[in-house]
Amino acid sequence: MNRLAITTGCLILIVAYLFTGCTVPRTRPLAEVVEMPTEDLQAGRIMFNNKCGSCHPGGRSAVGPSIINKPLPKFLVRWQIRHGAGVMPAFDEAVLTDEEVAQIADYVAYLRKQAKRSESES
Amino acid sequence: MKHIVPFSLILTLALLLQGCYGMLPSDGGGQIAYTARQRYVRPADVWLPEGYRIEVVASGLTFPTDLTFDEEGIPHVVESGYAYGEIFLQPKLLRLDPSGDTSVIYAGTDNGPWNGVTFSGGHFYIAEGGQLRGGKILKVGKDGTAETLVSGLPSYGDHHTNGPVVRDGYVYFGQGTATNSAVVGVDNADYGWLNRYRDFHDIPCEDITVRAYNYTTDNVLTEATGDQAVTGPYSPYNQAVTPGELIRGSVPCNGAVMRLPQEGGALEVVAWGLRNPYGMAFSPAGELFVTDNMYDVRGSRPLWGTGDLLWKIESGKWYGWPDYYKGIPVAALEFPGKNKPQRVLAQDPGEPPRPVAGFGVHSSATGMDFAHSDAFGFGGQAFVALFGDLAPVVGKALSPVGYQVVRVDPETGIVEPFAVNRGDENAPASRLRTGGLERPIAVTFGPNDDALYVVDFGIVTTDKRRGAKPRLKTGVVWKISKEP
């Protein structure tokens, strides 16, 4: 790994991360009945609804920004859940286990794919 | 190992720049310049799951809030007669004819809002909000004769008398709180009522003791400059509390579900510690569920980031207002750029339960009903109308929130859109410039459970200076059916 590659990678991450707080891009709404393909995703969906849905209903922008219209890597989603940032509170181990955090990150990635598919279809 | 340093720098920088939330303006769904004279309605602009269709049953209504069916299956709707923005009109119970025409069954005075209606045993039961003379439960015959089952409900404040539903000979109804979070403040003068009822405040259902945490504001009830008001929780404006002060509970009370016999009689508290229990429905298993509009970012004790909730009501339970949210102490909640809110109760009256489900912050979860069978699909799930945000009056929304009908699986708490406007963003039709949903406020299944009727309050625009501006004759009743 050379230094240039690391720096470039870091810059991409910074831009992606900052987009979570400083812009409010919209996401198309959907009324589609979706069966989760795995039990883990279903668990992530339930956890997301209970812990994240107030500010990001359906992953979309509301009081918080949309989190399904940007290429956030899963590790950054997990980091943000654990540590919070800006106005988002941190969710510690007493609230969410590591497994649950991972399930939420997987569900957010799944939602992002669904939103992208819907955008391309419409 | 050498990656740790640059990664830490990235995260530090990111954290520093995340403060931009405070700089972003509110952009709620009502924050538009609306000038159209007439509301445009087009069912094709509403997105539904595959296999469902939507049509318009009635339009041109003024502030419709609920719908019920009589024993012949004829739909009847109530027009509120009051809306935020201090609009006082005559509330009405209207029969909806198949042609879309309406006829008045019964009209009230200027004591709206009429927030709900249900039909049982040959009579309509109406929740009269009572902004001017206190809340009431009215019992109205099909011939228009009316009697008052209970009056003097504490509805002069921010929230009113809601519901009702009838079960096993009892009329159940919700009574909202006087204030946002138990302290009368400047926001209540902005709402209009503090100037009318200077001594009005929240009344607990049982005796409580409060901590001596008082709130100082400009005194909005005097002309003198520099005059300040010091107000304690559960107290009239400009009346402080002392440490451990006892506040007497009484019935009727605020933030509660209460009930009384269908034929009239003594009032009973079913549950309390709610904020604004608005929508009510019994599940197929016979359990009572209510939607509860949670705290706003306004007044002397603002709370941030609290989405509306769906509760399963257990008799005798205290649900946590004004010191809890979702069963979590509000003192643990973050408030960007501000101190955390202080608790006001010296002792909790009970252990607050966890909700069944949560909705978006400021989404205004209002009317609800259950699919009692599979005739419509999603049997056993709750359908909830999300009226939509009133930002910036109630707080900031980065994007419109609500403005749709959602379905909730009470087993998992999963909330999914059911009827939502097509478009590039989630928003009311007036903002999208389409003919879809505006502000759904009630949902009711038809007599055979095969169609869902959606009451759409109509257009309400908002701005910080003038508050809410509702538009007359923009209310609609929609009908959603399964395609054959």
Image (tube, grey):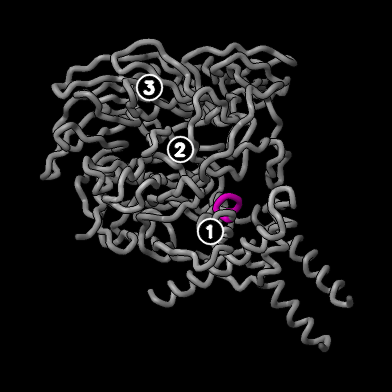
Residue B437 located left or right of residue B217? left
- The subunit letter for the residue under badge 1 reads A
Query: Which residue is depicted at the point 21% across and 35% down?
Result: B69
- Residues at discs 2 and 1 both on one chain: no
Q: How far across and down, in percent of the image, does residue B43 sit?
A: 25, 58
B394 or B292: nearer the viewer: B292
- Residues at discs 3 and 2 both on one chain: yes
Mark 2 sits on what residue?
A: B291
Locate residue B143: give its quadrant.
Answer: top left
Query: Which residue is depicted at the point 30% across and 36% down?
Result: B66
Under tag 1, what secondary structure? loop
Q: Is residue B110 visible?
A: yes
Mark 1 sits on what residue?
A: A61
Query: Which residue is depicted at the point 19% across and 32% down?
Result: B70
**Residue type, label 2:** Thr
- Residue B396 belongs to the span the image colors magenta: no
Q: How far across and down, in percent of the image, does residue B65 sit?
A: 32, 36
Chain part drawn in magenta: A48-52
Q: Furthest residue to the bottom?
A: A2
Under tag 3, what secondary structure? loop
B279 or B242: nearer the viewer: B279
Callout 2 touching callout 1 (CB < 8 Å): no
Q: How far across and down, in percent of the image, does residue B214 sit?
A: 70, 23
**Residue type, label 3:** Gly
Query: Label 3 crowding class (10 Å Cα cut-off): few <14, some 14-19, many 20+?
Result: many
Mark 3 sits on what residue?
A: B130
Look at the image and tell me in which quarter the C terminus of chain B lies.
bottom left
The answer for how far apart the CA atoms under marks 2 and 1 are is: 22 Å
